[in-house]
Image (cartoon, rainbow, N blue to C red):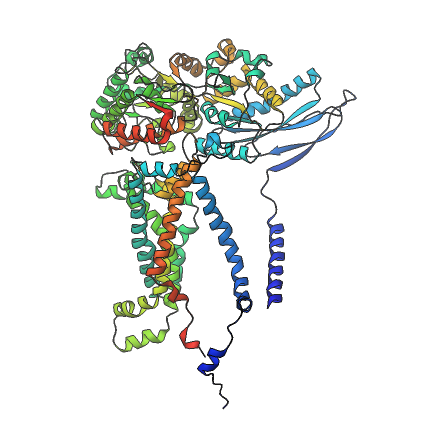
């Protein structure tokens, strides 16, 4: 009997080994082996096989010349980008490889950079988790391009390196707009390099305003009146209500905000007079400001029919389609939406010209009962370097060569993002772009997210209140109580309620 | 005819087998059970222990790379202090009970009875069709449902009902529970349908024929013969699907994300997932999420024992009495 069992176990073991062999290794990226033939200019140059790794959306290095005795350093960059307009995030790094290698050659450094990029449009949460798990597994990419607020988690966790002392070695970084560096700071140090910036404007539908009886002059002067604080958030809601009552737009289509949680809702709180950054990493929750926001949203959804109670349905496609079809009067969006719309939604109706004809944009109007100032929010993406990178200096060199007016302007024009360099103010391709030049002034009203490890929990709790009042589940006062309770339960001493 | 008689004295006098002998006698059984035992150990017991240990830490995105800090039962205290904990628990039981009774067992039984009472090939074809949602990728399946119940002017329901003067609505958000249960139920019913169908077809035809000869109606045959004879599959499906529904959340995540509004369709497993792995800004609280997950494991184990006792599963596996020689 025992022999039979042993025989059976041995057989099972053999079968498992065979199965394991058949299963093969985990899926690996497609690899293309290219032989690069190098013209013999100097004796030190040799022909070498270069491995070009192709993963997801890819641009690849075509030729890398490595000096004799030199080293080919393989770097990996990870970017989140909506195709096709945002792909410059990683593609600019690819485009910078040549300049980076040339700089190395000039310095007499025998190392050369070979770059692999991984680029897709994952959800922010999944994207962030992926980097954290990869870091813990020792497989983090050398460069990650992500939201600046992630510095608040990744810097204290040790996933990314402090780049403050490296920045001075690269003159390209002197050109970065000073205020954008604030977004890369945590604990008084800098942890990344700005990659892009944007504004989050109020878009308005010119046709619907005309139907409502507005003259062309009134429509064209709206951005200016908003910038001066003459047309307020409250005026916007009144106009939207009027449009709903007059049947110019359907109920719930007077004003739309984004369909799920995100950075935008923080500027509502700022506009209402709220502050968020406390001492160190601690965050502030200003009950008075939050209550103003909740009351405004409750009234817009439950009493005035301006905003649909189901607006937070998470459906981005319906959101873009509804707006570009002209069903909505006002919309709070992002500057990048402009590029998204003319590339993906109205390309067959005239593209960007169609947008200019039917839609306009301005800063987010001032909340009269809040700060009384127009507002917007910038959420810069930053390149960060993993603490696991074996060549952080090369990663930084590559980032510096991607931080040029030409590459950044190409990206900005394609993606509807704002430039990050001072020199772009005089750079003809940038200044001649109508959209970018008109959006740029909105930055005077801009605000940022905090770089704190507690931001995510703060945001989730605050959003809970927004969901409660818009769906009509709770009154604004009850929603505030729930949010305060949730914040205290989630963050304890790390949130200051006032 | 030779006959072996074993007297009671002989039984009493016999030496009890040694422990080694007993072990040797059962070695074959242990051998056969070993692969399954190893699987249960590796994929259930060890993960549960890890889950419990993680639930005692404050492990999150911002301290993932540091040594674990143990905080005792703080995560559990925080969980029970959460104002929405009772609502999420109620939602979970509502989801399990309604989906189970109306679809995973109820509709499954109706489908099995219908498809075994029509022409055999037609029944087979119908069951095959009903399996389609199960083999459809979850995302595609939910996209279909979202389009069916989409907001005006879209939505297949709106398109179908508008000729009858029904005002277009955002059905998914006005009746979220209906769709959550329908979406899960249509897929869940196929499991029971297959098991019940095979059990019904395994009932000897003699019983049915005899009942018909005695003048029993179809309803009486179902009530007095079919259902009593498939009670074990019924109990198995009820138990299995209860535990399965308790831990399932992917369709709800894709359909409503637990909304609309305030935790309207949020179930326990979805909360555990969101806490541990899914926030908009990606601050994952693995320790806290593990505490939510461990409570679910605990509820599942308790329910499994309750089912085993109430439904007397040991009767199902006891040795048949008639084969004793």
Q: Position of residue A318 (x, y in %)?
A: 35, 33
Residue B221 shown left or right of residue B1 in the figure? left
Q: Position of residue B135 (x, y in %)?
A: 44, 51
Q: Against B316, is B64 above or below?
A: above
Q: Against A463, is B160 above or below?
A: below
> Does the image show residue A33?
yes
Residue A281, image quadrant: top left
Residue furthest right in the image: A43
Q: Residue at x 45, y 26 (%)?
A: A343
Q: Position of residue B296 (x, y in %)?
A: 38, 46
Closest to the observer, B209 or A385 = A385
Residue A209, image quadrant: top left
Q: Position of residue B274 (x, y in %)?
A: 39, 37
Residue A328 shown left or right of residue A428 in the figure? left
Q: Against B265, is A305 above or below?
A: above
Residue B265, image quadrant: top left
Residue A81 shown left or right of residue A39 in the figure? left
């Amino acid at each position: 009997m025992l022999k039979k069992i042993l025989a059976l176990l041995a057989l099972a073991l053999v079968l498992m080994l065979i199965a394991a062999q058949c299963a093969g290794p985990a899926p690996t990226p497609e690899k293309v082996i290219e032989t690069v033939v190098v013209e013999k200019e100097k004796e030190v140059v040799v022909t070498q096989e270069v491995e070009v790794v192709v993963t997801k959306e890819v641009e690849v290095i075509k030729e890398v010349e490595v000096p004799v005795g030199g080293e080919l350093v393989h770097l990996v960059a990870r970017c989140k980008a909506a195709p096709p307009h945002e792909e410059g995030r990683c593609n600019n790094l690819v485009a910078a490889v040549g300049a980076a290698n040339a700089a190395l050659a000039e310095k007499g450094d025998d190392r050369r950079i070979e770059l692999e990029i991984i680029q897709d449009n994952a959800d922010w949460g999944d994207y962030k988790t992926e980097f954290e798990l990869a870091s813990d597994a020792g497989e983090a990419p050398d460069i990650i391009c992500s939201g600046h607020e992630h510095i608040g988690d990744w810097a204290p966790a040790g996933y990314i390196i402090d780049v403050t002392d490296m920045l001075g070695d690269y003159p390209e970084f002197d050109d970065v707009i000073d205020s954008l560096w604030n977004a890369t700071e945590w604990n008084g140090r800098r942890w990344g390099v700005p990659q892009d910036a944007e504004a989050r404007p109020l878009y308005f539908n010119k046709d619907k305003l005309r139907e409502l009886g507005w003259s062309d002059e009134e429509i064209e002067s709206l951005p200016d009146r908003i910038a001066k604080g003459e047309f307020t958030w409250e005026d916007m809601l009144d106009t939207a209500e009027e449009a709903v009552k007059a049947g110019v737009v359907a109920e719930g289509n007077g004003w739309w905000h984004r369909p799920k949680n995100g950075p935008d809702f923080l500027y509502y709180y700022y506009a209402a007079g709220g502050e968020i950054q406390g001492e160190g990493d601690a965050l502030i929750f200003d009950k008075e400001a939050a209550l103003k926001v909740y009351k405004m949203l409750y009234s817009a959804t439950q009493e005035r029919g301006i905003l649909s109670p189901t607006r937070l349905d998470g459906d981005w496609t319906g959101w873009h389609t509804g707006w570009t079809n002209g069903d909505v009067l006002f919309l709070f969006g992002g500057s990048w939406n402009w590029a998204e719309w003319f590339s993906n939604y109205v390309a067959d109706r005239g593209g960007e010209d169609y947008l200019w004809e039917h839609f306009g944009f301005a800063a987010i109007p001032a909340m009269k009962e809040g700060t009384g100032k127009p507002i917007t929010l910038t959420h810069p993406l930053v390149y960060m370097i993993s603490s696991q990178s074996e060549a952080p200096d090369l990663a930084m060199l590559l980032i510096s060569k991607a931080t040029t007016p030409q590459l950044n302007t190409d990206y900005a024009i394609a993606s509807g993002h704002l430039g990050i360099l001072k020199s772009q103010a005089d750079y003809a391709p940038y200044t001649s772009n109508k959209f970018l030049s008109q959006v740029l002034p909105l930055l005077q009203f801009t605000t940022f997210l905090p770089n704190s490890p507690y931001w995510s929990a703060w945001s989730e709790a605050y959003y809970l209140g927004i969901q409660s009042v818009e769906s009509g589940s709770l009154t604004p006062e009850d929603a505030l109580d729930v949010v305060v309770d949730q914040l205290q339960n989630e963050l304890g001493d790390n949130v200051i309620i006032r | 005819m030779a006959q072996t008689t074993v007297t009671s004295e002989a039984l009493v006098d016999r030496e009890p087998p040694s422990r080694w002998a007993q072990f040797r006698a059962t070695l074959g059984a242990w051998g056969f059970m070993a692969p399954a035992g190893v699987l249960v150990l590796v994929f259930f017991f060890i993960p549960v222990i890890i889950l419990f240990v993680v639930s005692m830490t404050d492990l999150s995105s911002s301290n993932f790379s540091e040594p674990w800090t143990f905080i005792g039962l703080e995560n559990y205290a925080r969980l029970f202090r959460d104002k929405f904990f009772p609502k999420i628990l109620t939602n979970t039981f509502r989801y399990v009970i309604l989906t189970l009774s109306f679809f995973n067992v109820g509709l499954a039984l109706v489908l099995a009875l219908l498809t075994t009472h029509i022409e055999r090939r037609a029944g087979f074809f119908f069951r095959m069709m009903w399996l389609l949602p199960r083999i459809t990728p979850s995302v595609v399946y939910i996209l279909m449902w979202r389009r069916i119940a989409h907001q005006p002017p879209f939505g297949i329901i709106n398109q179908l009902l508008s000729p009858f003067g029904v005002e277009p609505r955002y059905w998914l958000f006005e009746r979220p529970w209906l769709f959550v249960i329908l979406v899960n139920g249509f897929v869940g019913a196929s499991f029971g349908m297959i098991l019940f169908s095979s059990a019904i077809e395994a009932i000897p035809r003699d019983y049915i024929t005899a009942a018909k000869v005695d003048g029993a109606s179809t309803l009486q045959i179902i009530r007095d013969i079919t259902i009593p004879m498939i009670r074990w599959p019924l109990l198995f499906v009820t138990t299995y699907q209860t535990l399965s529904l308790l831990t399932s959340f992917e369709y709800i995540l894709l359909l409503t994300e637990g909304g609309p509004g305030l935790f309207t369709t949020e179930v326990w497993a979805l909360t555990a997932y969101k806490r541990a792995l899914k926030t908009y800004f990606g601050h994952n609280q693995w320790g806290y999420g593990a505490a939510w997950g461990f409570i679910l494991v605990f509820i599942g184990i308790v329910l499994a024992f309750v089912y085993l006792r109430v439904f007397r599963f040991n009767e199902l596996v006891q040795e048949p009495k008639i084969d004793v020689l």
